[in-house]
Image: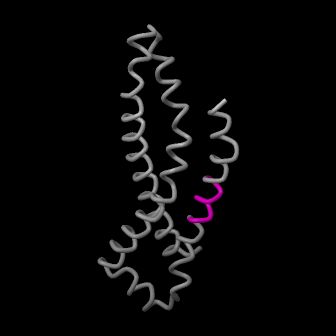
Amino acid sequence: MTKVQTYLFFEVLKAVVIIIGGLAMLALLAQGLSRTDLILENRQSAITYFYIVMLGAPQIIALLTPLALFVATVWSLNRIHKDSEIVVAQAAGMTRWQIASPIMRLAVLCLVAHLTVNLWVQPAAQR
């Protein structure tokens, strides 16, 4: 990958990580608040509470990954377009496919991560 493609890849990757992290924390907080009865009624420790809440994390991440990738791609490309970086890259001789290839590579990495979570991590958390 060229420097411009590496820059595009990491711009979208940063946005994906921020979006997944933020939405996952929000979802885990909402899920955790509904499980406070575990501590209050059954007198369990805080470690047990966090363990049970974290067992739901793979399912939440699996649900959020495609949405986060889409939003991050649109947001990053819009920002890069506003700063005229796409125009500069095209003026330097890059084709649209060369500009899109880092995003496609990130999409493939997200696909592999999504499959891994759905096929191995999530079933292990449900046991």
Query: Does the stretch in magenta take in 48?
Result: no
**Picture coordinates of residue 118 (x, y %)?**
64, 47
Is 108 contained in the magenta span?
yes
Q: Residue at x 38, y 21 (%)?
A: 36
Question: Which residue is located at x 55 percent, y 71 percent?
Answer: 102
Way the structure is coloured: one colour
Q: Residue 80: x percent and y percent?
A: 36, 74
Dominant SS type (magenta): helix
- The reply, left or right, for residue 108 in relation to residue 17 is right
Residue 4 at x, y percent in the picture = 48, 75
Horizontal side of 39 relative to 108 (left or right) equals left
Q: Where does the N terminus fall, quadrant-wise?
A: bottom right
Count of numbered circles in the view:
0
Q: What residue is drawn where x is 52% and y is 69%?
A: 6
Q: Quadrant of residue 106?
A: bottom right
Q: Nearer the viewer, residue 86 or 109?
A: 109
Residue 108 lies, in percent from the top left, at: 62, 64
Q: Measuring 43% from the left and 92% from the top, which residue is drawn there?
A: 91
Q: What residue span does the magenta drawing correspond to?
A: 107-113
- The quadrant of the rendering that contains the C terminus is top right
In the displayed structure, 37 sits above or below 67; it is: above
